[in-house]
Amino acid sequence: MIDIFFFEEVVGAGFSSFVGNDESYKMSIDQYLIERPTTTICVRVKWDSMKDAWIITGDLVLVDKSKIPKFWDIIIAIIDGNYTIKFLQKDNSWKSFLRAANKDFQDIYPEENLEIFGVVIALVRKY
């Protein structure tokens, strides 16, 4: 666990006074991002199928394997033994399929069962 200083004010175009070293302003990033530590893992993203959802190669996503997925959630799915990150969607007949956030990628309709590995709960990007 890493404690960092939490600046409670919303920051617009400027920056107000810094909170300094006051211990009451410390927070843990992992406690903020992860609700269920025993079922949450970190996955590094590769490729650009989700770029229009602002998820790009090199990003880290936190995935909760116990969360029940809903339509429009971003999920990690397993298709033919390969992992992929996509939106969970449904068609007019309520059949589940996967949709990329990049027009260059086609929708994926699993032939049998759609295996959902987990639901993406957070994105971490280092600049």
Image (cartoon, helix red, strand yellow):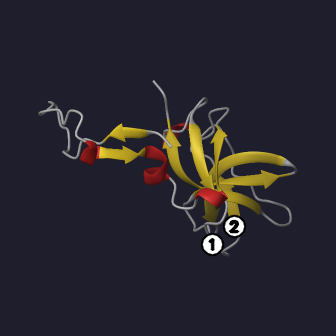
Query: In the image, residue 73 lies at what x, y percent?
Result: 56, 60
The residue sitting at 65% across, 59% down in the picture is 38
Disc 2 residue type? Answer: Ser
Labelled disc at residue 92? 1
Labelled disc at residue 96? 2
Image quadrant where residue 14 sits? top left
Q: Residue furthest bottom?
A: 93
The answer to whether 118 is drawn above or below residue 22 in the figure is below
Query: In the image, residue 85 lies at what x, y percent?
Result: 66, 47
Q: Residue furthest top?
A: 127
Secondary structure beneath label 1: loop
Residue 102 visible in the displayed image:
no
Disc 2: CA contacts within 10 A as few (<14), some (14-19) or many (>=20): some
The residue sitting at 85% across, 62% down in the picture is 111
Residue 42 visible in the displayed image:
yes
Which quadrant is home to the C terminus? top left
Q: In the picture provided, is 48 more to the left or to the right than 12?
A: right
The answer to whether 63 is drawn above or below residue 26 in the figure is below
- Residue situated in front as seen by the camera: 90 or 25: 25
Q: How far apart are the two marked residues, 1 and 2, measured between alpha carbons?
A: 10 Å
Q: In the picture provided, is 67 more to the left or to the right than 11?
A: right
Disc 1 residue type? Answer: Asn
Query: In the image, residue 12 lies at what x, y percent?
Result: 18, 37
Disc 1: CA contacts within 10 A as few (<14), some (14-19) or many (>=20): few
